[in-house]
Image (cartoon, rainbow, N blue to C red):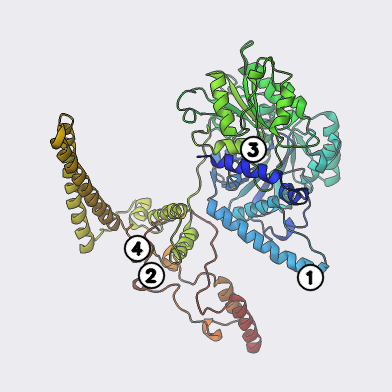
Amino acid sequence: MPATQDIKRALARVRAALPAERKVAVARRDVRLGLERISRIVPNQQSWIGLHVGGTNGKGSICALLAGMLKRAGISHGLFISPAIPEPHNGVLVNGRFVNQRMHQLELEDVQAAYRRAASGWTFAVGEDPGDATPFELETAAAFRIFETMKVQYGIVEVGMGGATDATNAMKHKSVTVISKIDLDHQGYLGNTIEEIAKVKAGIMRPNVPCVVDDSNPPNVMQVLMEQAEMVGTKISVSSKAEPLLADLDSERYSLETYERENLLCAALAFQLLFPKLELDVNKLLGSKPYLSGRKERVSVSALTGGTRKQPLLVEGAHNMLGVEALNTHVQAKVRQGREPVTWVMAMSASSTKPFAKMIETLVQPQDNFAFIEYARRPNDPPAVPAEIGRDVVKDVLFDQSQLYDGYPSIGSALQWACEKAGEGPIIVTGSLYMIGEMHQLEGVEAQWKTGTRRPGPSQLWYYTQLAQERALTPEETREFKQARRHWYLSPQRNAVFRSGADGSKPPPRVVPDRIRQEQRTAAGHKKQADECGSAISSIEKVLKGSQGVAAAELAQSIHVLKRRRDEHLRTYNQAMYKTRGHGVDPDRKLLTYDQVFGRSGKANQGQVVSLLHKHGLNEADIGLASTEASAPESAAPEAPQSCPDTTQGAHDKAPQPQPQPGAVPSDRLIERAMIKGRRKS
């Protein structure tokens, strides 16, 4: 059966073969710089303080280091990086954990709806259509809204492309900016010279907001940055000022490349400027592994290869010339052993300004093995360089054509070939981060740096509670529903046992209802019967080994009957245990009310209406809105589908919008009534 990545790649090739007029709509990447659109959908208020990191190379690593420093200091923070690997929600982290995928999706949907409303007003006021928001603008606005919802103190934000006109520059409150190493990249958008690019990247500076700059930048770049800083009204702090902070670095344990040290200096200086009274232990920081996926990462493929490959792969997202040169320095110093070959797996995104051939020739030597592949392009990803072009460039470098992979250009197939070719020798996967993200989704690939995901929160529990009454949940929704309910149930705010444990008091005695005791007895009886059937099956199987003919057939039939009985007992046992634990298909336990989930009475989606009524001195009865409870009594709750198990929560998360109830008055009409009656009273 073909893998998902292979199907996606086949579809991408079909699209590539479409007629020209249709192919344009498929292949075009939506990159439009500017702050006009994003400024209309980011929250008007920004309670969190921004740390804005730009540059060409190293900005993502600096963000990760800053996040590690804030985490060790016990300061709540959010992190927004791009591109996200491997899924869109993996680009937003809160306190070191990925945000819940459902929460991220809901925020994106809300941002899209908000932009559509804003665009309509814009068109009406100005007379021109602003067009759709770009995917990156939507992701940026969603990240900012998540930071606001989760009430983080600081938000660490990586610039997407450039600086001045990048969507992340819509940030309203910055405490420090950082500019890493600058080089030629994205010339089609930022400028043809390094000075022009530096000027654009300096656009993240703000008056009286300190700016940390990697002083390994060339003099012409430093000159541009200093001129821009003077024009804006701020001062530049060069990264070398942080050298004293690295005085105690254990260089034997943490052997840093030159660029890694510069990134650490930038992050350390930014942290010191923000928190001059806090100490920074760089050894403990590096020991916590504050790194991003795809940056000098060791990835295990033992499961992918069936155990034939024990050594991990080196994965490095070197996607421009500066990154390739840094990778080559590391390979020459730490990886290559004399004339032993290195096996490369590479994919690149297409760019008219990228020195494609030079990048390959910098890394590959004649004795090496080489596989050039393509990644499966997702919406708004840049197109991949065709595999044939990469193979043509490298074939003149290698000694023999047998060193060149000529199979299907997918990451899964290429990794299998590379592992067979290299044995336990070094394998390096490099190039596009989009390809690295695809690699991390392969079954059998185990990442070195693992990051947890925040649990679904109470509003997602409420969302699934409502959804379960409309239709059967999918397996993924069922899993999240279970997790959200479990977390909700074990929350100290909800559970008396955990609540009393937090303050040291004795938990209240728990009264076990007769119904639960009966279920416990039922479960114990069926478990005993199932165990006895299992013992009988084991005994008969031993006898069966030495039996033949009719006796063997009778024994086999007995085993079949006993297994069926055992399964029936286990099924009944599990059902009883589910009810005992409160997880059964019991509508009174599964489908919670609004006030049970959120700990307050009220009807979902009426906060805006009620607040407006109170503003005008009215109440619900004044406009014909009954002040009822948020949901029917538990006895009236509809039965849940059996595929919807229970769930849990995470602290602050996005409340999904429930479906309007039949006969309910729309919110806009309620607001209109309130305003009219308010005027009458005044």
- Taking depth in this image into account, of 377 and 64 the one nearest to the observer is 377
Residue 461 horizontal/vertical position (percent): 46, 59
Question: Which residue is under mark 4?
Answer: 589
Say which quarter of the image contains residue 289: top right
Q: Earlier in the sequence, mark 2 or mark 1?
A: 1
Q: Amino acid at mark 4?
A: Arg
Instruction: Measure the C-alpha gap from mark 3 to mark 1.
Output: 42 Å
Say which quarter of the image contains residue 541: top left
Q: Which is in the foreground here, disc 2 or disc 4?
A: 2
Instruction: Measure the C-alpha gap from mark 4 to mark 1.
Output: 50 Å
Question: Which residue is under mark 1?
Answer: 124
Question: Which residue is under mark 3?
Answer: 375
Q: Earlier in the sequence, mark 2 or mark 3?
A: 3
Category of crowding for the residue at label 3, using alpha-carbon neighbours closer than 10 angstroms: few (below 14), some (14–19), many (at least 20):
many
Instruction: Measure the C-alpha gap from mark 2 to mark 3.
Output: 47 Å
Say which quarter of the image contains residue 63: top right
Q: Is residue 514 in sight in this rendering?
A: yes
